[in-house]
Amino acid sequence: MKKRFAITVVALLLAGCGGGGRLSHAAFVKRVDALCKTSIAAAKKVEKPTSIGQIPRYLEHLRPIQARFLEQARKLRPPERDESLWRQALAFDRRVLHQYDLMTAAAHRGDQKEVVRISRRLQTLPARNPYERRLGMKGC
C-alpha cells in the first residue's frame, strides 16, 4: 500500500512539473526568445558582404550561428500543445540553413543572379514565418 501511494505521489509531482521534463508555455517562450536574441546579436556582429565574392565568407560566419540556435532549440521540450507549431518553426529554420548553403554554392559558382534571388528569398522569410509569432515569441 505504501509503495503504491509513493508511486502515485511521484506521478503527481512529475505531472505538476510540466509532464516529463516539458517546459511551461511561458518558460518555453522565454527560453526561445533568449536563444533568438543571442543569435540575432551574434549575426549582427558579422560584417556584411559588399561583393559576391565575400558572400561565402559571410555565410561561413552566419551559418554556425543559425546551426547553434537550431541545436539548442531542438533540446527544448515545449508543452504538448505547442509541439506541432514548434516542429514547424524548427523546420522553417532548417530551410533557412538550406538557403545559406544554396547561396554559398551560387556565390562559389559566380552566379550573381542566383545569389540575388536567394538573398531576396531570405529577406522575405521572417515575414513568412508565422510559427514563432503564433507561439508568442518576440525575440525572433
Image (cartoon, rainbow, N blue to C red):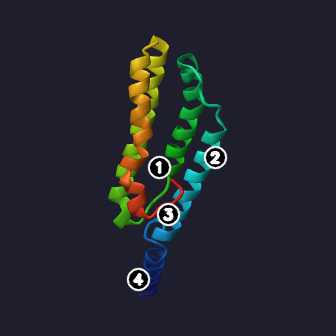
Relative height, residue 60 to residue 93 (above, below): above
Residue 11 on image: x %, y %: 43, 77
Q: Which mark is residue 29?
A: 3
**Label 1 environment density (alpha carbons within 10 Å; few <14, some 14–19, many ≥20):** few
**Is 45 situated left or right of 104 in this image?**
right
Mark 3 and mark 2 lie on one chain; the one further toward the N terminus is: 3
Residue 17 on image: x %, y %: 49, 74
Task: For residue 96, say whether it is visible.
Answer: yes
**Is 23 situated left or right of 114 in this image?**
right
The residue at which mark 4 appears reads as: 4
| Circles 4, 2 touching at the beta carbon (< 8 Å) | no
Secondary structure, mark 1, is helix
The residue at which mark 2 appears reads as: 41
Q: Check disc 4 and give the amino acid type.
A: Arg
Q: Residue at coordinates 55% horizontally, 60% vertically from top-left?
A: 31
Mark 4 and mark 2 lie on one chain; the one further toward the N terminus is: 4
Q: Check disc 3 and give the amino acid type.
A: Val
Residue in the foreground of this view, choosing between 77 and 131: 131
